[in-house]
Amino acid sequence: GGAMPGDEQMPEFFRRFFGPDFQMPGGPRQGPGQGGDDDGGIAGKSMGSGFIISADGYVLTNHHVVDGASEVTVKLTDRREFKAKVVGSDEQFDVALLKIEAKGLPTVRLGDSNTLKPGQWVVAIGSPFGLDHSVTAGIVSATGRSNPYADQRYVPFIQTDVAINQGNSGGPLLNTRGEVVGINSQIFSASGGYMGISFAIPIDLAFSAAEQIKATGHVSRGMLGVAVGPIDSLKAQGLGLPDTRGALVNDIP
């Protein structure tokens, strides 16, 4: 499952996403919905990616791709464009569910992000800098990775070394079977550009959030009501604890 397909397998692997006219190399390409495009220098216009999860027009993307937008347009790879309704979104999970009025659309296959392991090959499809239908590949670096800059919000990110740039956000991360296992969300960078550390939201979590949004318009989650942190050797010594097991309650909001 984790091996990268050989050259003889790649055409079929990509034909799933770019249609029966896919050729290697080059050639016309058709496939599932990828939102966004180059902004053409027009102020106030931004771009992102996304993918269709139901034939009747539900599209999954990132919250930050559509946050604050007065109007959202979804552009399919057959060049059709649709005005999209934001059904709802969740900032913590960085997931948004859109709806376009269309039927019979091609949809992605969803995989199981819980089965991902470090070292497995993955592929991202998106529109970095408006270069639509761009494909990049890499490996899973870690799973269950938290973002140290996300305050107290925890999302068990999939960390990869797949090249992700502006415009990739919201696009699918796929395993070598062509199944979506995550939503490309953000990078860790000191320069603002790609540096080999990318994060994707596990599809199990994202799809569960999308189902809640579809049903109620928002995501509900449990809350323990305390802020906890790890106990290192210095804290254990200062508190008179025999070892570093357990968790330290830092705050009760």
Image: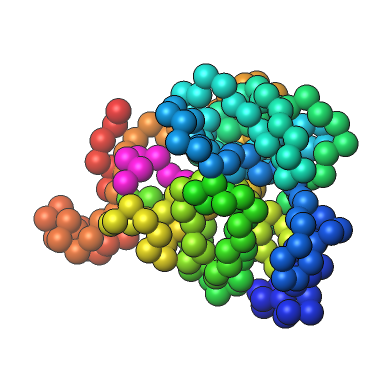
Check the picture and name the quadrant holding the N terminus.
bottom right
Task: Give the color scheme: rainbow, by chain, secondary structure or one colour.
Answer: rainbow
**Looking at the image, residue 135 lies above or below residue 149:** below
Horizontal arrangement in the rendering, residue 89 relative to residue 91 (left or right): right
**Residue at x 56% of width, y 29% of height:** 89
**Looking at the image, residue 81 lies above or below residue 134:** above
- Residue 83 horizontal/vertical position (percent): 68, 24
Rendered image quadrant of residue 98? top right
- Residue 249 horizontal/vertical position (percent): 28, 42
Check the picture and name the quadrant holding the C terminus.
top left
- What is the tally of numbered marks visible in this picture? 0
**Residue at x 33% of width, y 56% of height:** 189
Horizontal arrangement in the rendering, residue 7 relative to residue 38 (left or right): right
- Residue 152 horizontal/vertical position (percent): 35, 40
Horizontal arrangement in the rendering, residue 142 relative to residue 33 (left or right): left
**Looking at the image, residue 193 lies above or below residue 51:** below
**Residue at x 82% of width, y 55% of height:** 19
- Residue 18 horizontal/vertical position (percent): 76, 56
Instruction: Look at the image and tell me whether residue 126 can be seen.
Output: yes
Magenta segment main secondary structure: loop
Towards the viewer: 146 or 187: 187
- Residue situated furthest front in the rendering: 41
Q: Which residues are magenta?
A: 149-157
Towards the viewer: 40 or 92: 40
